[in-house]
Amino acid sequence: MELNISTLSDFVKNAYILFLKGLDNVPMVVRDSGLFRMDPIPQHTGNTKEYSEIDVQQYARRKAQSAQAERARVVQGYSKIGSLYRVALDIGISYEMRTQNKYPEVVSKLTNLGSQANNRLELDLTHRITFGASTSYVDMDGVTVDITVGDTFQLFYTLHALKGSSTTYRNILANNPQFSKGALEGMEKLVVENTYNNLGEKLTLAHDILFSTDDPNLVNLVKEHLKSTASPDAINAGVVNVNQGKYKHVIMPRLATTALGAVDTTKAKYWGLASSVGSQAFLGMAEEAHLKVPQEGNNGEEFSTDDWNFGVRAGWFIVIVSGNWIKLSKGDGTA
C-alpha cells in the first residue's frame, strides 16, 4: 500500500485505514463466545459499577380456600464491583520512514497498533479463567488483580457459599481429569448436582459452552466427541452421538498462558462447561479501541525528533459475580 504523506492530514487518513485493518485482524474469541455479558458503559457515569444476583424462589405454594397467598421468597445474592481501567500504547513514525520509501515498516507499525488493545482485552478476559483457581494474579503491568467472586472465594472452588442457604457447591471437577467421554459425563453430573440459586434450590441451567485451550490433542479429542458419526456401512452403523450439537466448542488460544502472555504448558489441558444464559461474568466496555492521531497544534509532532506520534487507547472492566454458571477441570489429575 502506498501512503500519501504530502500532508499530515493525508497521512492520518491512511493511518485510520491501517488501524482498522489491524482491529479486524484480531479474532475476538472470548469476547464473542457467550462467556461474558457485554455492558456498554456511557461516559460521565463514573468509573465503577456494581453487579448483584437476585434470586426468587422457583416453585409456587399450595393455597387453601380463602387463605392468603404466600409471598415469594426473594434473596439478593452476592455483589461485585467492577472498576474501569485504561490501556494504551504509542508508536512514532519517523521522518525517515515517511520520506525514504519505508512504507512496509509504516504499514506494519500502524496495523499492529490496531491489534494491540484488542489482544490485551482477549488476554485479560481469558486470564479470569486461566487464573480462576486463585483469588488474584499479577498481570503483565505488575498490578495485582483481584479475581474473587462475590462470596470472596476464587472463581473455581470446592465450597462456594450461597447467600440464602447453608448449602455449598463446587464448580471444579474432582481430581481434574483430562477430557474424555467419562470425564465429560462427570462434568455433566457436576452441572446437575452443583448448580443452585441462592435459596439452595437446584437450577436447571443449561451449560451450552464447552471451552478448552488450543492444545491440538485436546481440541481434536473434543471435536471427536462432539461431532463424530458412524458411516451407514460401518460396524457401528446407527449409533447416535449423544453429544452432537449439544455444546458450542470455544477454543481459547490464550488460556494456557502466563500473565505475560507466554506459553504455559502446565495449563495445556484446561477445559470446562459454561452457561451463556446464566453467565455472571460481565465486560463493562467504556472505551472501544480507537486511534489517537497527531494534529496540527496538539504536539503530535515531536519538535526534536520530527516523529509523528500515533497511539491506541481503550478502557474496560471485568467482573464475575458468582461461579454457579461455569465448571472447570485443569486436566492435570490433581486432587
Image (cartoon, rainbow, N blue to C red):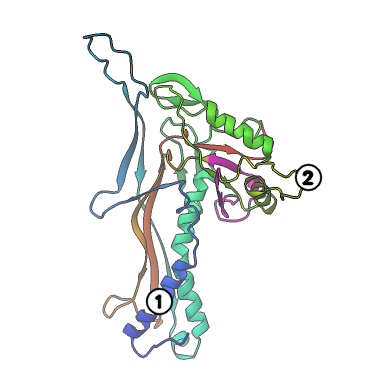
> Is label 2 in a helix, a strand or a loop?
loop
Q: How many marks?
A: 2
Q: Is residue 142 visible?
A: no
Answer with the quarter of the image where residue 18 lies: bottom left
The residue singled out by tag 2 in the image is 235
Q: Say whether residue 194 is magenta.
A: no
The residue singled out by tag 1 in the image is 17
Q: Please name whichever residue, 223 or 20, is drawn nearer the observer in this view of the structure.
A: 223
Q: Amino acid at mark 1?
A: Ile
Q: Quadrant of the C terminus?
A: top right
> Is label 1 in a helix, a strand or a loop?
helix
Gap between marks 2 and 1 measured at Cα: 56 Å
Label 2 vs label 1, nearer the camera: 2
Name the residue: 75% across, 50% down: 233
Name the residue: 50% across, 55% down: 29
Disc on res. 236: none
Q: Residues within 10 Å of mark 1 (few under 14, many from 20)?
A: some
Q: Say whether residue 248 is magenta.
A: yes
Q: Which residues are magenta?
A: 246-273
Name the residue: 63% across, 34% down: 185
Measuring from the top left, give residue 179's x and y in whole percent: 66, 41
Name the residue: 48% across, 36% down: 206
Q: Amino acid at mark 2?
A: Ile
Q: Please name whichever residue, 109 or 33, is drawn nearer the observer in this view of the structure.
A: 33
Measuring from the top left, give residue 244's x and y in whole percent: 60, 45
Q: Please name whichever residue, 299 or 147, is drawn nearer the observer in this view of the structure.
A: 147
